[in-house]
Amino acid sequence: MSEARDFWSRRKAAVQAEAEAERATVEEKALAAQHAELDEKTDAELLAEFNLPDPDQLQEGDDISGFMAKAVPDRLRRRALRRLWRLNPVLANVDGLVDYGEDYTDAACVIENIQTAYQVGKGMLAHVEALAAPEEVAETEPEIDASELAEAEADESYAAEPSPEPMLMAAEEDSEDAELTPAPRRMKFEFEG
């Protein structure tokens, strides 16, 4: 019996969800048609129709809740919100906690008359020229820096140490007496019955 109730309760919920979805689509279509009519009108006509003040003439403390109605077009709502954000110091001033609020473009960091060896399409010019240099230059003795010299000295000191004598391992005798590890066993169950 509980399965039957579960089916019918799920069915009833599905029917209610379908009815709500249909209602929502009808409302959206009506709202879209209304907005299409309102888009043809100018802002002055819309403000007179909805009995709203000019958003550009709003002062601090004025009520903008009339602009938040669903019937008001988005362009008027945005104008009123922009004006509100300019007037209210709490909304106008950034608190410094905004990620990426600063200018991180290269233009902000460029130093005038900076020179670099990088060339577009060629990369670092000195590196390219070093690779293209004739073999005569490569045959000359390369300069050794301090890190390579320290590594070479460490290798020489390691080679100078006597190596430990190799250990001899006793060979295992293959005999039948040697213990073998037992093969894994499976559990067997017996039922009396």
Image (spheres, helix red, strand yellow):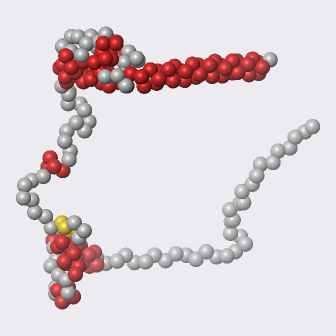
Residue found at the very far left of the displayed protein: 113
Does residue 9 sit above or below 171 in this rendering?
above
Using the rendered view, name the quadrant where residue 12 is placed: top right
Residue 60 vs residue 71: left or right? left
Q: Quadrant of residue 124?
A: bottom left
Question: Image height check: is 30 above or below 119?
Answer: above
Does residue 90 appear in the picture of this structure?
Answer: no
Horizontal and vertical percent position of residue 30: 50, 20
Q: Quadrant of the C terminus?
A: top right
Q: Position of residue 141 (x, y in %)?
A: 16, 85
Q: Nearer the viewer, residue 17 or 81?
A: 81
Identified at 13% across, 64% down, the residue is: 116
- Which residue occupies 44% across, 20% down? 34
Image position of 103 (left or right of 181):
left
Asked whether residue 59 appears in the rendered view, the answer is yes
- Residue at image location 40% in from the left, 78% down from the top: 165
Relative vertical location of residue 34 with respect to residue 130 in this rendering, above or below: above
Residue 159 or residue 73, whichever sits in front: 73
Which one is nearer the viewer's eye here, 80 or 146?
80
Which percent across, then down, holds residue 19?
62, 19
Q: Is 113 on the left or on the right of 53, as rendered?
A: left
